[in-house]
Amino acid sequence: MKRHRNGEIWNFESQTPAAGAGVILGLDGGTTSTVCVCLPVAMPPAGPLPNPLPILSRAVAGCSNHNSVGETAARETLQEVMAQALSKACSSRAAVQAVCLAVSGVNHPMDQQRLLDWLRDIFPSHVKFYVENDAVAALASGTMGKLHGCVLIAGTGTIAYGFTEDGREARAAGAGPILGDWGSGYGIAAQALTAVMRAHDGRGPQTKLTKNILDILGLSSPDELIGWTYADPSWARIAALVPVVVSSAEDGDEVANRILYDSVQELADSVIAVVRRLRLCDGGDTFPLVMVGGVLEANKRWDIGKEVINCISKVYPGADPIRPKVEPAVGAALLAWNHYIKEL
Amino acid sequence: MKRHRNGEIWNFESQTPAAGAGVILGLDGGTTSTVCVCLPVAMPPAGPLPNPLPILSRAVAGCSNHNSVGETAARETLQEVMAQALSKACSSRAAVQAVCLAVSGVNHPMDQQRLLDWLRDIFPSHVKFYVENDAVAALASGTMGKLHGCVLIAGTGTIAYGFTEDGREARAAGAGPILGDWGSGYGIAAQALTAVMRAHDGRGPQTKLTKNILDILGLSSPDELIGWTYADPSWARIAALVPVVVSSAEDGDEVANRILYDSVQELADSVIAVVRRLRLCDGGDTFPLVMVGGVLEANKRWDIGKEVINCISKVYPGADPIRPKVEPAVGAALLAWNHYIKEL
């Protein structure tokens, strides 16, 4: 364990017992916030997991996507949130047995390697590390730590990520709005804004989206949407318009319905591509299909999540839809715990 | 004429004759550069214009789109380029009779009003001002200053802008990439990048775009396109991939061909929407269709501009395609000159 410039983060350790009970850390690092949970190593290694899980502590911090805030800020956030979780659990780095860091923006083995090297520098040498894309934590949150099946995330962004039981993996989408994540919240909202512009200038049909979107944004003309859109490049700000699109579709607006049906197909296509490549459903096998994110969670008449499941089930009847009962950070911790138990 | 903080821009005027011959300024302000030309008022008010035009001077500066660089920087650029053009023409503000400022980012009467107020503050009170979107200068560059017909611009962005002879105007598209300018250079390239991601993760068919785009960017895998794309938010950098899409289509790639045909339809739809709203082609009237921008100027086997004209002509046979022989800043100057002569 080397000294860090910001070593004061770890000062609390001088007041914790030298050899506490072993713990596991699970981190879910997104573009909005980062969550770290601490679990005890001592859970029954076979049979059902304790319910509720004996979560020792939970800490929350800001964004840890290095593409968004830069590498230095991302690492400081990760270090702080881990220190906070350990401090709240009255534990210390000496007690840590395994860490699973699941962060958005990990798209390449190089991203993974850099984070692994950095973790090794912070923790004692015996600690096991797992660095993954945050989609993997979401999958594990639905399967209680088992890496098998496919997860579909559709919030501001979207990605499908799958694992076979023998460790092969595949992903689809997750490349952001410029590279065609049309089923994401951002994609749905951008298509709705586009439909308003097209109705306004005569390229497209009239739509209730015009009045509904202008009302909610307090604007008086579609021309003002241009200024509104480019005033702030935040993807989440655009994606926040999804509920207006859903309510317009529920109101019978054809343009809004078309956008939602297209997005359902896009989201289903991502899952289908992953399942096909991994042969998750060969010979009628069933596989967990974990569904996560605001776009899939709307419990309204127009239920995007339900439509996506229908669409996938027509191609792969073995899809077993799961809405996770624990958060992704817990999924990450269970994943680290599973790995650790197996390696023992 | 008030004093300005940056009044030293105008110091050269103390060395120019108190009452020089009357001049006209035309400005074309884009996101990349701003051009100002100076024409003499004394040209024959009827009959054909002199050929070549007696352009007194030409000055070039950087970006003057206030959405892109902010209002202060945009105005400094505009003031500097006007001062430079007058200084090169051995003229001064006292000789200016009319100014046409055609700048990108003027989307709303409020944008127009702010620039008019600012111009009034710089020039003597008798000067006539015309503030327009830069598309208007492009139209005037094809019609030699007459505001009639429709211009289609397709470079990094795209817009269609039209005027009737009695002064009604309409536009379509021009709302940037988030709001659906799919026929633009940026739109074409973003669709190509998306097609590469879809081929890579199994959502879409294989395409020659993959090898061709990775080769030109020096990348080894489509995964690396994510980092490349979001490393720099410049739209022009993405749009620079259009020639790869065109050459892939010429090579027979179906995905690239589909993207180009869809973009042709998008571009034609913009013009058709404007012509329909303005009734430019009622009763078989002909109207000037001015075509401007890199996307429309490719003189290859796959000629996007030619295909767009074909597409429009099927709906409006009266479209009379024009490729401008002068630059948009000259169009702006001719527009100011025409207005000025009429008002005399």
Image (cartoon, coloured by chain):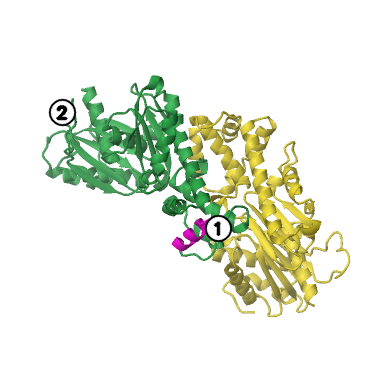
Chain colours: A green, B yellow
Chain letter for mark 1, please.
B
Chain letter for mark 2, please.
A
Residue at 68% over, 30% down:
B251
Residue A54 appears anywhere in the view: yes
Check disc 2 and give the amino acid type: Pro
**Highlighted magenta segment, given as a residue range:** A206-217
Give B214 or B96, whichever is nearer the viewer: B214
Residue B211 lies left or right of residue B335; in this view the side is: left
Give percent across and percent down for residue A333.
Answer: 25, 35
**In the rendered image, which quarter is residue B36 located in?**
bottom right
Q: CA distance from mark 2 to mark 1?
A: 59 Å
Which residue matches tag 1? B68
Q: Are marks 2 and 1 on the same chain?
A: no
Check disc 1 and give the amino acid type: Ser
Residue at 54% over, 38% down:
B194
Which residue matches tag 2? A44
Residue B244 appears anywhere in the view: no
SS at badge 2:
loop
SS at badge 1:
helix
Give percent across and percent down for residue B340.
Answer: 77, 73
